[in-house]
Image: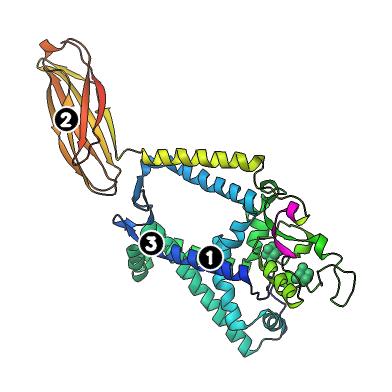
Amino acid sequence: MVRKSLPIVQPADVRGRYHRARHTVFWLLIALWAALPWISVGGHPAVFLDVEGRRFFLFGATFNAQDTWLLFFLATGIVFALVYLTAVAGRVFCGWMCPHTVFLEGVFRRVERLVEGPRERRIRANAAPWTLAVVGRKVVVQTVYLLLSFAIAHVVLSYFVSLPNVFRMVRARPAEHPEAFAWAFCMTGILYFDLAHFRERLCTSFCPYGRLQGVLIDEDSVVVGYDVKRGEPRGKVSETNKGDCVDCTRCVVVCPTGIDIREGLQLECVGCSACIDACDEVMGRLGRAPGLVRYDSTHGLAGERRRFWRPRIVLYTALLLLGGAVATAAATLRPDYEVVLLRAPGTPYVVTPDGVYNAFDLHLVNKRGTRERFRVTLEGDSDMSVRIEPSDIELDALAGGHVAIGTRVPSERFHGDFRVRVHVERTGADDPREVGATFLGSRP
Ligand code: SF4
Ligand code: SF4
């Protein structure tokens, strides 16, 4: 039985300065991503999105459900930073930082290279009849892929349920935590399918970011490009009156999306720079200057003046600085606790021969990552008697609590509605808060 070659691209190995730099970045990113759930800042993981507790810990800062609006800044900030980066440096995010690229190029492709050999051997093996050795190597590779997908899925899970919980869940039976088990199971399957079999098709056919390149970059954005003026007309080394491109197709066989950069910038180019290293290597062997394929703008590749500051970059920079300032102010000016005073459910007030009664419900939310103590006092009419339960309240990190406030004014002393003010003080801090409400009533 003869198998057809796998439809996925089998890029050739490449060496060079960008390859080394990129893989250094990959490993730094992987190390950071795997370490963050272990690093504790202020008693909590450095990055922890506690779904169950509806809390978010970010490098010592704590956020709860009331801070959801800050996510607007986070989401728009990430999107805008990506737009800015693309306008300046093309798809540098895709080639150097995207998790899909980081794991595919930094981990998964390494496994098959290690077990199944270089590109030519892999292609030959895929096209040849089954043998025990070929099947054995495939089984090893796919098993390692599955284990890697399983590990990645569980590290991702730890960002949402914390590391100790992940360890506990892994040791327990799936029926004890069905949601987390289903999530980890599905994520393992998706990662395995994507990184082992789907690969570059995610970038070339599905990723919406790749589809937007046309509008995000301009002729001054730095992209991976081929110097047509220098390279053409291409021809063999032995031929005279030819450009520097010797048509060796090294830049094509190393491309993880299988395109030919000499045909110009294409949507499928993820800016990985493999073709730069490949061509520089060829140029080096021929004693010619590197950079026939290089990072440059379309203007630069055409020999024209390169510009960094152009209207869209000026506008993006101004918007980025403004957005950053507003987001920083919003995050830092955020109070450490929330106080809301509501009238207690039921009738607004009660009148008895004894007096006029108003009841309030004070809702306190501790927004710090530590346990805090609060004291509640009330100020109002001097004839008013007050009952506060409890007047001293302790709240866990990011926890909320209620204080019941009952007030009474003797009927003969009630002369009309008036304001009451509730004071809240946090022990050991100088950030008192005051909220007010109207004492309502009528004479019997
Ligand atoms: S054309 Fe070059 S930079 Fe673009 S994806 Fe292919 S190898 Fe990477
Ligand atoms: S690697 Fe360089 S010389 Fe070889 S085909 Fe590509 S551009 Fe031409």
x 29%, y 49%: residue = 369
Does the magenta run of residues contain 299? yes
> Residue 390, relative to residue 180: is it above or below?
above
- Magenta stretch: give its range: 291-300
Left or right, 101 with reference to 425: right
Give the Cα separation between the discs numbered 1 and 3. 20 Å
> Residue 440, relative to residue 149: is it above or below?
above
x 23%, y 31%: residue = 361
- Going from N to C along the chain, the mark reached first, 2 or 1, is 1
Left or right, 99 with reference to 381: right
Dots 2 and 1: beta carbons under 8 Å?
no
Q: Which residue is mark 2?
A: 377
Question: Quarter-wise, where is residue 428 in the image?
Answer: top left
Q: Tell me which amino acid carries mark 1.
A: Val
Judge whether residue 345 can be spotted in this image.
Answer: no
Q: Tell me which amino acid carries mark 2.
A: Thr
**Residue 380 image position (x, y, % from top left):** 17, 20
Q: Is mark 2 within 8 Å of ligand 1?
A: no
Ligand number 2: quarter of image: bottom right
- Going from N to C along the chain, the mark reached first, 2 or 3, is 3
Does the magenta run of residues contain 413? no
> What element does badge 2 sit on?
strand
Give the Cα separation between the discs numbered 2 and 1. 56 Å
Question: In the rendering, which numbered label is found on residue 265?
Answer: none
> Residue 342, relative to residue 335: is it above or below?
above
**Residue 230 image position (x, y, % from top left):** 81, 63
x 17%, y 23%: residue = 379
Question: In the rendering, which numbered label is found on residue 37?
Answer: 3
Q: Tell me which amino acid carries mark 3.
A: Pro
> What element does badge 3 sit on?
loop
Question: In the rendering, which numbered label is found on residue 25?
Answer: 1
Judge whether residue 11 can be spotted in this image.
Answer: yes
